[in-house]
Amino acid sequence: MSLYLLVKLAHIIGAAVLFGTGAGIAFFMLMAHRTRDPALIAHTAGVVVLADTLFTATAVALQPITGLTLAHLAGWDLGSLWILASAGLYVVTGLCWLPVVWIQIRLRDLARAAHAAGEPLPPAYDRLWRAWFVLGFPAFAAVLAILWLMLAKPGG
């Protein structure tokens, strides 16, 4: 197998990890949130923080490396519109993801504290949940757009 195909495979796997982990995290967080059970939310958010650390962060770090390597190996112009748009959307995704990670940690900690005290979730949990939920939409849309750009390569 050529170096180009190996790097392309790594890049595709990274994109799948970003998309799949993001969708899975959103689903499991939403399902846990709907129960309003602090113990379940604390456990789920703990697993989500771990998954983001192990999978998402790794893919986030490797995607630019594999993307730039692919561009070099294929001879693509880094100034082409689809590459610039992909890079811009990647930054948008990151600007949404970084606060989401912090929010997930806070949601986990608030749920743990509520569970330990035998109390319902505090109002701060609901405020953070809304922010987490809202930030997911532009991040998810940006990832979908990046995937389309990678496949279609509009304008060459």
Image (cartoon, rainbow, N blue to C red):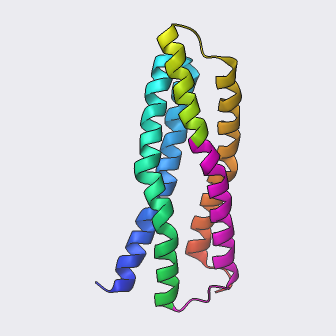
**Does 81 appear in magenta?**
yes
> Is 154 drawn above or below residue 64 in the view shown?
below
Residue visible at 60% across and 16% down in the picture: 121
Residue 15 visible in the current orientation:
no
Residue 20 visible in the current orientation:
yes
Q: Quadrant of the N terminus?
A: bottom left
Find residue 83 and report its horizontal and vertical position in percent.
63, 78
Q: Nearer the viewer, residue 138 or 43?
A: 43
> Is 108 drawn above or below residue 18 in the view shown?
above
User: How would you classify the magenta stretch by its main secondary structure?
Assistant: helix
Residue visible at 68% across and 23% down in the picture: 124
**Does 43 appear in magenta?**
no
Find residue 14 and report its horizontal and vertical position in percent.
44, 63
Q: Quadrant of residue 129?
A: top right
Find residue 95 and report its horizontal and vertical position in percent.
67, 55
Furthest toward the left, the residue is 1
> Is 48 drawn above or below residue 87 in the view shown?
above
Residue visible at 64% across and 17% down in the picture: 122
Residue visible at 43% across and 58% down in the picture: 58
Q: Which residues are magenta?
A: 75-101
Q: Nearer the viewer, residue 113 or 67?
A: 113
Q: Quadrant of the C terminus?
A: bottom right
